[in-house]
Every structure is written in structure tokens, then in C-alpha cells.
Amino acid sequence: MNREFSLNIIFLISINLLIKPFFIFGIDRTVQNVVGTETYGIYFTLLSLTYLFGIINDFGIQNFNNRSISQNPNLLQQYFPNILVIKTLLGGAYLVFIFLMAWVWKYDFDVCHILFFLSLNMILAQFIYYFRSNISGLGMYRVDSVISALDKLLMIFICGALLWLPTFEGEFQIEWFVYAQTVSFFLTALIAFFIVKNKIPKPSYNIDLTLIKNILKKSAPYALVIFLMSIYTRIDAVMIERLLENGEEESGIYGAGYRLLDASNMIGFLFAGLLLPMFAKMLKEKISILPLVKMSALMIWSGSITLSFATYFFQNEIVELLYLEATPYWGEVLGILMLSFIAVSGTYIFGTLLTANGSLKKMNYILIVAVILNIVFNFMLIPKYGALGAAWTTLVTQFFSMFAQVVLVKKEFGWKTNLRETLRILIFCICIVIITYGCYNYLGINWIIRFGLSLSAGIGLAFLLGLVNLKFAFDFLKNKF
């Protein structure tokens, strides 16, 4: 299992590093520069609104299904037609609820068509996630890796043509960006559907209402987890737009910083997608998961700590490079948001383990407190500090959630604190801060080279301290564990 993880995480990261960063920085960033911060802020707020109530659209089915299929692949033939019915009904209910909330919060009628297609995109995305949960649950990790990047690849071709072909020069609208997402999600969902369908020996589309009821009942705990996480990760932009007079502009600034956090989270999200079925299968077969947890946590932390501190020091240079309207304030928002990436990367490991273990009720208590902290701090800080206040709220909330999940994992599995590993992480953090500070302030060369040196030093230090251990990885590849 560790050998499979090592091979697939390398393949997964490689294919996504080729495609998703180009989409985020080549397409998404260009769209913001072309349409302007305020217009993009409207889009980002509406997008956050669709994420906020995504629980109605998914209801925890993706995580429930991934765990179930990875432990018992024979359930696919029985679950597949019934979950498709559930997903369709939930999608309809989700659309109704989104527009009900838009009416309650008095959003302008002019943005309703954008909101409709963004909601439709979310429905299609959830279908893709569901199909992928079957693909990864069946152990088709490389196919899952390709599907995970396919929608972004299609977006690059479609939006690239709309942004850069002379025929459309100067005419690009934010609506085009949303419509391109719809086409890309639809095609990806269609391909993923046929991949799963072809894995069912005798496809049957008999609907079992009793089974549907049982699936909804079993997926409910997963639904609450997703709902609570959606609130404390996506409510910020909505609250910024609602609480401030210049909310659309501030939301656009927050979205600009969040874009880099989202890009960084890509790696953690990919880790979680691979680890969930592996953790579930190993727990069922009573295989020790501690080596896999340790390897994945140290690997992802070594990268997140390096990137977060490097981005924090070079915050102004980065936003000036990426955005036409950038100011030092944009850099402050980015810097604080990126520090939260250290905590977010940890929750991708430990939250995934708790989900695979079925410790959802206890994890929900943590998430409820995180939501309360997030909303309270946002109400306190956003009116005074704007997007920067929301960034500080994200930092506090994410670190609380990570530390609480680590404590819960230790309690659930009876693991003791490894002082040696903790000390190595602390030494790594201190060294990265010193090295990056030195690169930023004392090297008289181009800042991009200094930034690259900071990242390279982090990678080298991770190997030196054994956070990324090549011998250990080679042993995995030889299947010695």
C-alpha cells in the first residue's frame, strides 16, 4: 500500500503541476486582470456562496462512497444507479436553496444568471467528485489523477482562445469564464461517467428506495463535516461583501490572495483524495497506518512550511508580478492567508484519517467550534480591517482546527507524542525563517532568484533533517513495509 501511495502521489502531483498552476496563474489570474478587481470580486463572492451551501448538493456522499467502495468494491453495482438518483434530486434542491438565499440576502437580479451557471457548475463538479470516488475506490489511482486535471485542461483551451485570439481581443466578460467552466465540467463528468459505467459487469438501473434512504442516513455524518468545513473556509468572502461598503472590491482583493492559497491547497487535496481509500482499506485489514501517516504528514509539512514563509516574505513582489492593481495591502492579505496553508495541509492528512476511521461525530465537535470562531472573528475584524481581517480569521481558525484534529487522532489511535519528530519540525521552521529572511534582505540579486533559492533551501533542509527520507521512500518502492 505504501509503495502504491508513493508511485501514485508522484504521478498525481506531476500531472497536476503541469496543468493546474497554468490554469490558476495563466487563466484565472488573467481573467481578474482583464475584467477588473470589483467585477472579479462579484464573481468570487457568488462562487463562495455556491460553496457555502454545497452540502445540499453533496450530502457527504462522496466521502461515504469512497470509503465504502474501497472497502467493498462489489457495492458499486448496487450503489451506482441509486446514488445517481440521489445526486440528481439533491442538485435540484441545491439550485432552489441557492436562489432562495440570494433572494433573502437581496442580491441584484443582474447577477442571477451568473449565480445560476455557477450553481450548475457546482452540481456538475459534485458529479465528477462522485465518479472519481468510485474510480479511486476501485484502485484506479492513475485514471483518477487524469480525471482530476481534465476539467482544468479543457478550461485552458477554451479560455485561452477567448482571452488571446485576436477575434475576441478586448471583449472578454466574466460570464464567458463561467460558461467555459460549465462546458469543461460537463465533458469531464461525461467521460468519468462512462469510465465508471464500464467497470460495472452487468449495469442495472433499478431504483431501490430503501437503499436510497439508507445511503442518505449513512452519509449524513459526512455531510455535516463538509457543511461545517464549507462555512469556515468559504463564508469569509460572503461576509466581506455583506459587511463593507466597498465589499465587492475587498472581496476581489481577498480572492486574489485566496487564489494562491487554493493553488497551494491543490497538493493537499490530491493527498487527501489518495489517502482516504488507502486509509479505509488499511484500517479494515488492520494494517498499521502509522508509517503512512508519518510519511505523508512530514512530506506535506516540509513543502507547506517552505512555501508559506517564502510567500510571506516576498508578498509584495508576488502580488505586483501577478496583478495590475496590486498594492502593499494586497501583499499583506496574501502573506497572512499563505501562513494558514501550514495548518490546512495538516488537516488534509489528519482530517482524512479521522474520516476513514469513522470518527465523524468527534470531528464535528471540532468543526463546530471552528465555525463559531470564524464567524465571531470575522464580525469583529472585517468591519475594521477588511480583507486583511478575514485573512487573520482564516489563520486562527485553520490552526485551531489542525491542532484539535491532531489531538483527536492521537486519542483515537492511542499514539504518543513523538518528541523527536516535533523537534525536527520546529528546527525546520526556525531554519526556514532565518534562511528566507536572509535571502530577502541580504542578497542583492533579482527577487525571483532569491525566492527560488528560499524554496530550494527548504527542499534541501527537508532532506537533511529527514522530513523527506529518500531511503524510506525507496524502501516503500521495494515494498519492504
Image: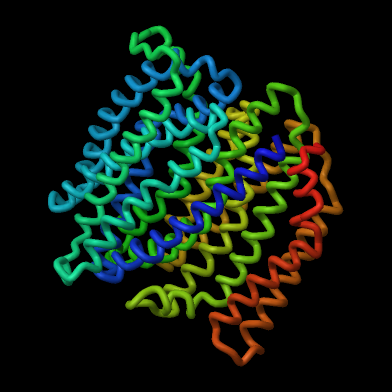
Indicate whether 363 appears above or below 201: below
User: Could you tell whether 413 is left or right of 164 in the image?
Assistant: right
User: Could you tell whether 21 is left or right of 81 in the image?
Assistant: right
User: Could you tell whether 385 is left or right of 112 in the image?
Assistant: right
User: Could you tell whether 117 is left or right of 290 in the image?
Assistant: left
Q: Quadrant location of the N terminus?
A: top right
Name the residue nearer the viewer: 12 or 27.
Answer: 12
Name the residue nearer the viewer: 48 or 69.
Answer: 69
Instruction: Name which residue lies at 53% across and 69% down.
Output: 335
Number of residue marks = 0
Going by the picture, which residue comes out furthest to the right? 420
Tell me where residue 200 appears, x and y as whole percent. 44, 18
Q: Quadrant location of the C terminus?
A: top right
Q: Answer with the quarter of the image where residue 8 lies.
A: top right
- Colouring scheme applied when the structure was drawn: rainbow
Q: Is residue 454 visible?
A: yes
Instruction: Name which residue lies at 53% across and 66% down.
Output: 336
Tell me where residue 4 appears, x and y as whole percent. 66, 38
Q: Is residue 381 visible?
A: no
Instruction: Name which residue lies at 72% across and 41% down.
Output: 293
Indicate whether 369 appears above or below 421: above
Instruction: Name which residue lies at 64% across and 49% down.
Output: 346
Going by the picture, which residue comes out furthest to the bottom? 444
Q: Answer with the quarter of the image where residue 190 lies.
A: top left
Q: Answer with the quarter of the image where residue 7 lies.
A: top right
Tell me where residue 43 appears, x and y as whole percent. 27, 56
Indicate whether 444 appears above or below 173: below
Tell me where residue 142 appears, x and y as whole percent. 53, 40
Name the residue nearer the viewer: 265 or 277.
Answer: 277
Name the residue nearer the viewer: 221 or 437.
Answer: 437
